[in-house]
Each structure stands twice: as structure tokens, then as C-alpha cells.
Image (cartoon, grey):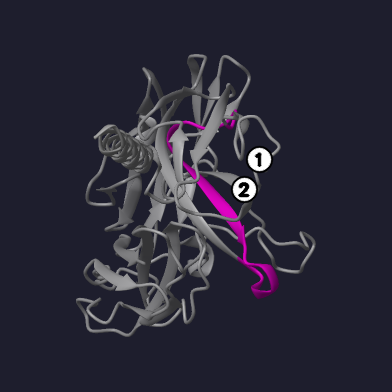
Amino acid sequence: MTMRREAWLGKRDAQRRISRLALFTACLAMASPVHAFTITEPAEGAQLAAGTTMTARVDLGKDAGIVKVRYYWYNEQDEVLVEQDDATATGSIVAPVAMVSSLEQEPAFGGPLKVPQDSIGPMRLLAVAEISRGRLGTRSVFDEVIVQVTPPAPLTTIDFETEKPLQLGRAGQSSAFGHVDSLGKVFALPIVGEFADGITRRISSPASGTTYTTSNTRVIKIVGDGLLQIVGNGKATITVTNRGKQASLDVDVNVNDEPNEPPIADAGTNKSVKAGTRVKLSGLKSRDPEGEALYYSWSQVRGSKVSLLDANNSEASFLAPAVSEPRMYRFKLRVTDKKGADSSPAFVDVTVEP
């Protein structure tokens, strides 16, 4: 009887130990990250001061084998640039790396990261993690957040970074903005602000707090997002305001007065695709009111850089990279007609899934 009781007690204790172990394992599984590589600091939408140093942190999640993480700062609508080993390569554009971090850093794969001193408004922080696959080489995963950056000092003056007064269409239709000046052309004016901390910051974007007005809507029209459009010949004064400061620019337009409406860019509808598939971006629905042929320009403005093929054709493409969880890539399309009139930009988001 005693032996039976001892056996029963032993069996019960073993079952309890198994139950506790199962509970511990379940709790451990619940506590363990099941997501992919993620920026945890700064948080999405965080308010940061330009020029300050904050601590960047990442959660590796289920992405194993990470050997280093590179951090990049971009303005919200900047094109994504590639870091190249040879910075002197002819014609190359190299994205500045804000920080490279490894396991030995504190915190691991993060560390002190300086907010660009000349930044203002929405900024993207892109973190690209390099994963070692042994003899198979490496692959990368990324995450990015958008933060709001404010200058630590008041704005003192605003100025236009262009000739004054601005002549559009004179001297045989020469152009200062990349295309022949014509009716319907859409362009941006470079505007800078001098701040009390001695830093000059670009404030052309309304997201930086700049508003635009025109004295003559029959000559220059404000079309939004810091863009202006030539709609007729004559004179107009463009006024910009930011943080209580103001600046004005006289514009004299003398272009071929042949009627020309700007083309309309259509980058297609947002889509979701599987990693490893060839993705086609279509601008075929873009149109010109006069039915003229169009010139196309695709660029990437969100996500880790991909190799974009046929960026100057109506249809561009790229190979969807490997991802650990859904990641969004954003592309911008601008179209131009034969007379030099540009469209406003159109955007399309492509979500790549594992």
C-alpha cells in the first residue's frame, strides 16, 4: 500500500513539474518577439529637436543572423539613395550613413544617433539590417519611422535661392528649372530659412511650415505641396510665410503663349505582392489633355532601396526583396509633355509580403 502511494505521489509530482514546465515554456513563447526587425526608438511620430542626440534602439524579432545595422536620415519625400563602396564612382550618388551599429554597441545594433542639424519637419529614419547567410552571402531587412523635427532656435529670415527678379521663358526659352519654360509648366522654388542657431535650413515644403501666395493667378498659380504653375504671360509676386517671417519674389513670365495644359500622372493603384516576384509599376493611365506624348520619371521615396528598372519608361519594374513581415515601398511618378509642362507627382505603395 505504501509503495503504491509513493508511486502515485511520484507520478503526481512529475505531472506537476511537466505542467509548470509547459506553463513556463508558454509564457516564454508569449514573451518572445514573433515579429520582424523593428525600430523601437524613436517611435513613429516622435517629436525631436534638430541637432540633438537620441538613442536609437531596435528589436531584432525573429530575424536571426543580423551582423550590422545602418541608419539613414531622409526628408519625407526624398528619393532613397544607395550607399556605395566606391564613393568616387563617376555619376554615383551616395546616401550619407548616419550610424553603423553592431552587436557590440550599447544598446546592441543601436546607439547614440544625431538628428541632422539642418533638418526640419517630417523626417524618415531608415534602418537597414544586414543578415549573414554564410556561403550564400547576405540579405537585408529594414524598418523605417517618420518623426517630426523642430529647430531648436527661432527663424530669423527667409530667402529665395534663385535669381531676382526671376525671369521665366526669356532668352530663347531657356529654362532654369530643368525643362523649357512653357505654359502649364509646374516647378518648385528653392527657399531657405536662417535660424538663430546659425543653421540654414531648406523650408520649401509646406510640411516645414511654409505657405505660398501669388499676386496674379493668371500668371503663376499655386498648385499645392510647394509647387507653382505657369498659366500665362506677365508679372506676379510670390510671397512665402513661415513662423511669422515673410519673403517675396517678383516673377516675370514671357513664354510661348500657345495653350498647353499640364499632363496628369497616374502611378496606378496600391498593391500587395509576394517576396521574390517581379513587380511592374504602370504609368500607362497618365495622360496629356492635348494628347501629346509623355516623358516618364519614376523614383523610390520609401523603403530600403531596390533596383528600379526602366525608370524613364511608362512601365518600371523591380524584384520584390525578401522580407520577414509585410513592408511598404513607395514610388513617385512625374510625367512631362513635349512642351515641357510637368505633372504634379503621383504615388503608389507596394506592400511586399513574406
Q: Which segment is the magenta one?
A: 116-138
**Spatial distance from mark 2 to mark 1, Cα to Cα?**
6 Å
Side of 321 relative to 346 (left or right): right
Does residue 238 appear in the picture of this structure?
no
Which mark, by number, is residue 70?
Answer: 2
- Which percent across, then down, holds residue 271? 25, 69
Residue that mark 1 sits on = 99
Q: Earlier in the sequence, mark 2 or mark 1?
A: 2
Q: Does the magenta segment cover residue 228?
A: no
Task: Decide: is 92 above or below 314.
Answer: above
Residues at discs 2 and 1 in contact (Cβ within 8 Å) = yes
Task: Decide: is 320 above or below 205.
Answer: below
Image quarter (top left, top right, bottom left or bottom right) of the C terminus = bottom left
Residue located 46% across and 24% down the image = 48
Type of amino acid at the residue the image marks with label 2: Arg
Type of amino acid at the residue the image marks with label 1: Met
Residue closer to the observer: 102 or 257: 102
Residue located 59% across and 24% down the image = 51
Q: Which quadrant of the view contains residue 350? A: bottom left
- Which percent across, then down, holds residue 317? 41, 79
